[in-house]
């Protein structure tokens, strides 16, 4: 049976319309899929990208004293420490049992120190104590323990018996640089 022209055109229009909707749907689908891929990629990047330098501008501290405008945030030369100073990943990164992560490779997912060293203030001195107790789970104490202990060793090897002076910064103002006025 012959379909009248008007009806045929309508049918064609409907088919065209459906195709257009399909195309739009496909386009949005592809777009969202694409965006999802980008998000997943950057999401993965957060913990696996090995930064060249790390600006230590943590703002979780209860009270932060070494900060701008008086003091610069520390710019830690992460890559240089690994490549130039030949310090291996496991000398700084460890697991929840404090075992060095010696097999760490570029591209592995790495936890930030602050994910475990979550305490943001040093313990206060209690009555009868000469000195406040040291708590390594305090972020500042963990950072100082890692950075300063090694720097002192480096300086002792370089000839200063106290480890204070030498190639590696071991005094407050050598790391916490004063901001220029
Ligand atoms: C001299 C110490 C030191 C060495 C050596 C070192 N790292 Fe790090 N790394 C750090 C510190 C400190 C941070 C900052 C962590 C933070 O912000 O809590 C860091 C951060 C990272 C991060 C980013 C983590 C994040 O979520 O932002 C990755 C990834 C990483 N290191 C991987 C490596 C790998 C792989 C090696 C060896 C090839 C290595 N590191 C060597 C001290 C070091
Ligand atoms: C997965 C959890 C976790 C992460 C991530 C972590 N730590 Fe630790 N860290 C610990 C634990 C647990 C100890 C042991 C505490 C104790 O002995 O009471 C420790 C101990 C330390 C010590 C003392 C070491 C010693 O043997 O005396 C230092 C210094 C330290 N961490 C620095 C860091 C630094 C710097 C980072 C980041 C580069 C980091 N930690 C990341 C859990 C972690
Ligand atoms: C295991 C040893 C080790 C650890 C851990 C370490 N360093 Fe160093 N650091 C060195 C050595 C070695 C040098 C270079 C000394 C020289 O110039 O010969 C250095 C140099 C530096 C310098 C001056 C030169 C530069 O590259 O900027 C800064 C600043 C510094 N370290 C900051 C840090 C900070 C912050 C941390 C902790 C997050 C840290 N270091 C942890 C060994 C270490
Ligand atoms: C080897 C480098 C280094 C030396 C030396 C050093 N610090 Fe730090 N300090 C750090 C790093 C790394 C952190 C953790 C990241 C941050 O908060 O900047 C930190 C954190 C701190 C904080 C907590 C953060 C804040 O803003 O309040 C205080 C306070 C502090 N340091 C005081 C000192 C004092 C006082 C000295 C000298 C006795 C000293 N530091 C020596 C590297 C160093």
Image (cartoon, rainbow, N blue to C red):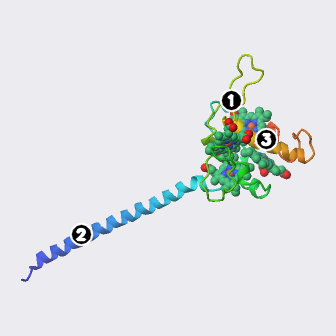
- State how far apart marks 3 and 1 are (Cα): 17 Å
Quadrant housing residue 127: top right
Visible in this render: residue 100?
yes
- State how far apart marks 1 and 2 are (Cα): 68 Å
Residue identified by numbered label 3: 148
Badge 1: few (under 14), some or many (20 or more) residues near its Cα, within 10 Å?
Answer: some
Labelled disc at residue 174: none
The extreme top residue here reads: 127
Badge 3: few (under 14), some or many (20 or more) residues near its Cα, within 10 Å?
Answer: many
Judged by depth in the image, the label closer to the viewer, 1 or 2, is: 1
Residue identified by numbered label 2: 17
Residue identified by numbered label 1: 122
Instruction: For the N terminus, give its image quadrant.
Output: bottom left
At 41% across and 60% down in the image, what residue appears? 32
At 65% across and 43% down in the image, what residue appears? 97
Mark with earlier residue (1, 2): 2
Q: Is mark 3 within 8 Å of ligand 4?
A: yes
Instruction: For the C terminus, give its image quadrant.
Output: top right
Badge 2: few (under 14), some or many (20 or more) residues near its Cα, within 10 Å?
Answer: few
**Does the residue at mark 1 contact the one at mark 2 (Cβ under 8 Å)?**
no
Q: Above or below — where is 177 with respect to 122?
A: below
Visible in this render: residue 51?
no
Indicate the secondary structure of the residue bearing disc 3.
helix
The spot of residue 151 in percent (x, y) is: 82, 44
Mark with earlier residue (3, 2): 2
The extreme bottom residue here reads: 2
Mark with earlier residue (3, 1): 1
The spot of residue 14 in percent (x, y) is: 19, 70
Indicate the secondary structure of the residue bearing disc 1.
loop
């Amino acid at each position: 049976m012959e379909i009248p022209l008007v009806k045929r055109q309508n049918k064609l229009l409907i088919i065209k319309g459906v195709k257009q909707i399909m195309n739009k749907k496909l386009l949005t689908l592809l777009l969202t899929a694409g965006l999802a891929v980008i998000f997943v990629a950057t999401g993965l990047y957060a913990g696996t990208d090995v930064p060249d330098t790390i600006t230590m501008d943590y703002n979780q501290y209860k009270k932060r004293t070494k900060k701008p405008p008086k003091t610069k945030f520390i710019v830690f030369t992460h890559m240089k420490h690994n490549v130039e100073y030949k310090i291996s990943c496991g000398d700084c990164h460890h697991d929840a049992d404090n075992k060095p992560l010696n097999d760490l490779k570029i591209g592995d997912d790495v936890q930030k120190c602050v994910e475990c060293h979550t305490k943001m203030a040093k313990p206060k001195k209690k009555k009868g104590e000469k000195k406040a107790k040291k708590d390594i789970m305090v972020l500042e104490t963990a950072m100082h323990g890692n950075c300063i202990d090694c720097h002192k060793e480096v300086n002792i090897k370089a000839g200063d018996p106290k480890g204070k002076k030498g190639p590696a910064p071991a005094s407050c103002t050598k790391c916490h640089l004063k901001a220029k006025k």
